[in-house]
Image (cartoon, rainbow, N blue to C red):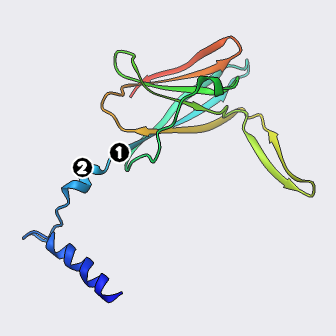
Amino acid sequence: MFPVFLFCNFLQVKDLQGNGCVENEKSLEAKGQIVYLFFKVEKNISGAEKVVLEDKKIMEGRLKSKPSFDRNSAKTGDFIISLNDENGKEIVKQIVENPLNPELERFDEEGISRNKVTLQNAEFSVRYSHSEEIKVVRVEKVTTDGTQLLFTQKL
């Protein structure tokens, strides 16, 4: 154990420059950024949903896997989030399960059961790998007739 500890410390000392800072350009280049978008959705008296982008955060890191988009897996009520460039070209597309009707698990004497809950307001978020190309976010709701645009905003 002691030789491994000594060897690791030697590697760190070797990377030190005269000013005492560790230069590690490769790790800086390898680190990406993840963007988090936090939304709030409210259902008004008439039943129409209103979506608001509440916050945007950028953190260092990389997504372990890129979310896949399968239009056939979207159910009525789910949201489709599109991240586009300034010309409207889609860069990333994701599905968010209906945030106003989440399915909750409950454990009782009979076992685990799933129940849908109806909410008047909810919060949801999406994350994606940072790209300078992404300039616009769109939120659409899947309906029986196709999709309904709920929200568009420049980032």
Tell me, for residue 29, which label it has, or none: 2
Q: Which of 22 and 121 lies nearest the eye of the viewer?
A: 22
Quadrant occupied by the N terminus = bottom left
Residue corresponding to mark 1: 33
Is residue 85 left or right of 13 when viewed as pictured? right
Distance Cα–Cα, label 2 vs label 1? 11 Å
Tell me the residue at 20%/79% (across/down). 10
Q: Position of residue 57 (x, y in %)?
A: 41, 43
Q: Position of residue 42 (x, y in %)?
A: 65, 29
Q: Which of 57 and 129 lies nearest the eye of the viewer?
A: 129
Tell me, for residue 84, which label it has, or none: none
Tell me the residue at 6%/70% (across/down). 18
Q: Residues within 10 Å of mark 1 (few under 14, many from 20)?
A: some
- Is 38 situated above or below 9? above
Q: Give the SS element for disc 2.
A: helix
Q: Position of residue 149 (x, y in %)?
A: 56, 16
Quadrant occupied by the C terminus = top left
Q: Hey, what amino acid is under mark 2?
A: Glu
Q: Give the SS element for disc 1.
A: strand
